[in-house]
Structure formats: structure tokens, C-alpha cells
Amino acid sequence: MPLASRPAKETLRLAKLQSYEILDTPPEPAYDDITSLAAHICQTPTALISLIDANRQWFKSKVGFEANESARNIAFCDRTIQQSNVLIVEDTHQSAQFRDNPLVTGAPHIRFYAGTPLITPDGHALGSLCVIDYVPHQLTAKQLQALRALSRQVITQMELARHAQQLKAINAQLEQKVRARTLKLSSALQQLSKTQTKLLKREAALRQSALHDPLTGLPNRSYFLQRLDQAIQLVYRQPQHLYAVLFIDLDNFKPVNDTLGHEIGDFLLQHIAKQIKSLLRKSDLLARVGGDEFAVLLDDIPDQDHAIFVVQRLQARLKQPFVMTERRAFIGASIGITFSCVGYRHPEAALRDANAAMRYAKKQSKQQSKALLQSQLKPQRSEAATSSSKVASGQLSGQLSGQPPIVIQDEALLHQQFAVFDTVLQGQAAAQITLEDELRQALLRHEFHLYYQPIFDLSVQPFATPALTGFEVLIRWHHPTRGCLEAEDFIAIAEELGIVRQLCSQVIQTACQQLKAWRAHPAYADLCLHINLSLLQLTSPQIVSQWRTYLAKYDLPAAAFQLEIEEQVLLSDDATITQVLNQLKALGLRLCVDDFGCGHSSLSRLHQLEISTLKIDRSLIKELTRTDVSDPLNPQLESSAQASTKGTDIIKTILDLGNSAGMSVIAEGIETSEQLAALVALGCRLGQGFWLSEALSVAAIDRYLAK
């Protein structure tokens, strides 16, 4: 039957038949048992399970029949599915409907047929269960009842097979989903495992970075305090347990770092860390707690002498020179010691006290080094005096273009000290903490004020009224209980606390604002200010932007300011410092070398940095007060006369150097009339000091300018 002309009901029936997926399947015992039972019950030689397809009838099971299928148009079953009851033909020869059927007139010569339709639960007749005989036959009521029951079993078997097939398909889908999900989960687990591994590595790296110094690989302050706290707790459980805390500060690291650069400085820190660690026991702990500061925990030591012995070994090792390419640096260390017998409850307190002891040791070391340096400078100055004529004649011009001599602290000046914390140092440590807190509060309370020491032109006559050319800016702290403190009393601690940069910005702004006001006086339109810059300030590029901002804000020429730097800066080849200096010069600011003549300087660096002014160190000015009269009966007077002559020669050399190089020279620290007269006689044009004027407040200067 063509698809287009097939009734809708037949189309649905055929679709239902296809859904069972039974056509053309191999024989199955479950169906064969039903046909055998039907033939037996009905006492016929043949029984068939026939399914009606579109153009054929196909036998799923057969008993006593050879063919597998036949044409639908001659099939008895095609008539059976068109009714709901059993189709019985007791004698086909007597049936007008079937007697001419090819299956009757020809093989297999059917004479009897009884078939019951196979009806699905939703009412579709798919085929029949039939019995066939080749002679006329009759069925009893019980046989017909049994035939109906067996037909229902065929449908039941087909439903079971279909459900089984559906379950199989569902299982296959589920298995596919499970496999896909398993693969996805496996991939997710692998990714999770990789992520977990990365997180563990990152956590370990964070733990390492949180507790270790990235440069040296040593434990940091946090790690050290944790271990120290464990030692403190152990003392409470075992009172006989003894430990010592060492605080190590490298004595000469900063000049080396500034002179040779941070790369060499970093390498030096790594080298020193290895040197210190090599002298310690495995049970001891070495940590880096600051830029050039280390701490050592000597745990479970037999006695205090053991710690002293370790300190002496450390200082002996650190006293050895650090050798680089054609350069030798002597470092050394100041070390503070404290012991568990003090009775610490908190690790921070122990480290603080060891730090206080170190500060005391460093102070003693500086005092000894300063005394030795002063004793060595006197004979050196006599040698410098012989160069005066060379400077004047230009014989030193070659030095201005040569390589800068790098001079790092001599071994003879290396006075390493160590100190053990005691009650005296405890008081000093408490005072230090108080001072640090007061400094922080002072910044918030605006307790810092600027004073200005006048700089005069000494060549103006009459000399009784020297001409004012400018001021040196000096910072003072108006302490609420201690009065007015000078910079040397607090500036070093301010640098350690990191508040110097904030102070620097305030100083620049205030100085610019004040100079703008003073230059408004017509007679003082050319006043200039000298402002001191430390190495710490020169490592901050922010200072360039601060100057640029305030010069523009107050509409001042940059040449109105001279930035005073130490001689030590001339020896530095640090790229950051050089860059900052060049940027400040590019703004038009001028550079002045402070305390010139007290140490070593690089003449070529004076030229490279285009230094505008040299300030003669006050120690040289001080020697001018000594008598020039010799007395054979008084050797001390003879020595003083010689020192005065040597001091005069050095000052003359500096003045000649300034004249030949086009630099101004200022004598600072003029405290007597004799010094002033000597400087004027030597041709020194500019000077400052208490004899001329002390540092003045803004109000005092305003009154002076108003006269």
C-alpha cells in the first residue's frame, strides 16, 4: 500500500510495530514455546506467531511450517488484525472468503484456520497467534480460551522485550553519560590536583617570603621573633635554660653601598650572611632584621662567656677586608648582647634591648674612630698645604678629568665594639623609644621650625657692616619639655623612622614661601638659601618633583637655592643618587659641598657634578684661633703655631681651588674675630658663624630686613 494512501491508523500501527524492533530477528525460545503450546492445546499440526508488516506477513515463531513470510494480501492474519475477536475458519473450502485463496488452493492447502489478534496495550493489532490444520477442524471453548490467553502472552513477551531494549538503550545512554561525566570529573580532578599543587607551592612560597629575607635567604624579623618566643617559653618551663640574643649592625656598610652601588652592596650582604652563619652552630638562628642589621639567637648555651666568645669570633671574621676588583672595603660590626636572665616575657623586648646595646657599642666605636681620624688628619693637612701652588698654577687639572679615587674606611679606623645590655642601657633604650614616639607626634603637631643662619660677603667695606647674601636653612625641634633641639639631636633617628622625607617636603615648601617674602624687599631681591640634603633624601626621586612644584608655586628661580651635600656624596657612584643630582641640576638648582676639606674628595666629581660652592669645614676654621707666636720654652705653643700654619695653608689651597675652578668658597663656623680677620686676609669672600650671627628665627630676620 502506497504511503500516501495509507490510512492514518495503519500508519500508527506500523510505527508501533517498528518500535518493538522485532521484525527479522532470530527465533527465540520464549516465542517458540508459546507456538508449541498452542499447537498442542488446539491439537493442530501448525501454529504461527505472525506479524503484519506493510506488504508482508512475517513469522516470528512457527511450528509445522516451512516459510518465513508471505505476501500480506493473501495472509489470513491480515483479516485477523481487522477484528478484535478470534477469526475461525473451520473449513476453508466451505468459506466464500477463503476458498479461492492461493494458500488454500495451493500449498500448503490450508483447510482450517483459527487466529486471535495480537493487540498492544494501547490498542494496535500487530499480528496474530494462529493454529492451522490441513483438514476441517473445530475448537472447543476451552481451546479458544487458551488461544486468547497465549496471544496475550505473546504481547507480554513483546512488551518485555521492548522494555528490555529500552532499558538497554537507557543504560547505554546512562553509561555514555557516566563515561562522559567520569572523563569530565577526571579532567576536573586533574585540574584540581594541578591547582592544588600550584596553591601548595604558592603557599609555601608565600610562607617562605613571609618568613625569609629574599636577598640573603635568611629568616626575617618575624621568623626570628617566633623562634625567640619559643626560647622564652622554654625558660619558664626550664629555668636553667640559657639563651643570648645578638644584634649586629654593620659599621661601614652604608658608605660602601653608596660608593660602590647597590649591586655590590647586595652581594656584600650575602657574603657577610654566609660568613656569620659559618661561625654558628646548627642550633643557632641567624636572621636579617634590617638593611644592614642581623640578629642571632644563641639558644641553649652553657654560660654567658660562650656568647662573648661567639661575638669576638664574629668581629674577628668581619674585620677581614672585603676584596673586589682592585678595591678593598673594611666593614666591621657593632654588636649588642642580651641574655635570658633579664627575664623577658616578650621576644620584641629582648630584640629591642639587644638593639639598644648595639647602639651603645656603635656610639663608642664612632667616638674612637673620630678621635683617631682627627689625630691622623693633622699630619695629612701639612701635605695638602704643599699642593697650594700646584692648584694655583693649574698643575692639578689632570686630576679633574681622571678617575675618582674611591677611599673606603681604613682598617686603622675600624674600632669594632660590643656591649652587653644592663640597667643603664635599659634606661637609654626607654629614652630612645620615648624619643621615637615624640618624633612621630612632633610631625603631627608641627613642632619642627626653620631657623636661618646668615651668610655674609666679607669683602664689603667697611667690614663692620658685612653685606648679607643669603641664609643656611637649619631645622629645629621645639620640644615641649626639652626646649629647642638642634638637628644633630634627632635627625639620625628621624631617618631611621622614615619621617625625613615628610620633613624634607615641609622644609622645601616653607623655605620657598619664606624666600619669596624676603625677596620682596628691593634691597634683598638676590638673597639665596642653602638647604642641606642627606644621602637618604638623594635616594628618593620624589625630591625632584617637590622642588619643581614649589619653585613653580612661588615663582622663584632655581638658582636662588644651593643644595648642600656631604663630601661622601662625591665618592658615590650610585646610579640613583647621580640621576637625582643631575635632575636637580637640570631644574637650575646649584650644588654646594658641605664640610669640604675634612676628608677625601674626588676632584673629577667636582667637575662632573658642576659644583657651584665649597664650604670649608669648621674644624679647619677652628685651627685659625691658635697663636702664630712660637715659644721655645713652651712646646705646646710651638705645636699650636705649626697647626695654625698648616690650617691656613689648607684653607688657602681650598680658596685657590675654588678660584681656579670657578667655584664660590664659604667659610663656616667663624666663632672669633681672629678667625674672621685671618679669613679676610686669605681672601675668603663669604662666611658664616656665631661671631657674625647665630641662626635666627623668621621674626628676627624680618626685623633685620626692615631696618
Image (tube, rainbow, N blue to C red):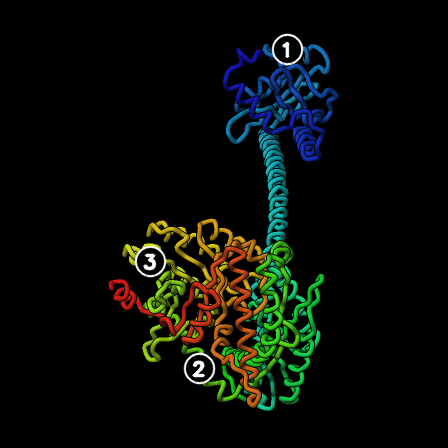
Which structural element holds mark 2? helix
Q: Nearer the viewer, residue 247 or 669?
A: 669
Do labels 3 and 1 touch, CB within 8 Å?
no
Q: Quadrant of residue 136?
A: top right
* Residue 19 x %, y %: 58, 28
Q: List the residue tagged with mark 1.
A: 99
Q: Residue furthest top?
A: 100
User: Left or right of 675: which side holds 113?
Assistant: right
The residue that appears at 64% across and 12% down in the rendered structure is 93
Q: Amino acid at mark 2?
A: Ala
Q: Amino acid at mark 1?
A: Arg
| Crowding at mark 2 (Cα within 10 Å: few <14, some 14-19, many 20+) | some
Q: Quadrant of residue 175?
A: top right
Q: CA distance from mark 2 to mark 1?
A: 131 Å
| Crowding at mark 3 (Cα within 10 Å: few <14, some 14-19, many 20+) | many
The residue that appears at 57% across and 87% down in the rendered structure is 632
Label 3 vs 1, first from the N-terminus: 1
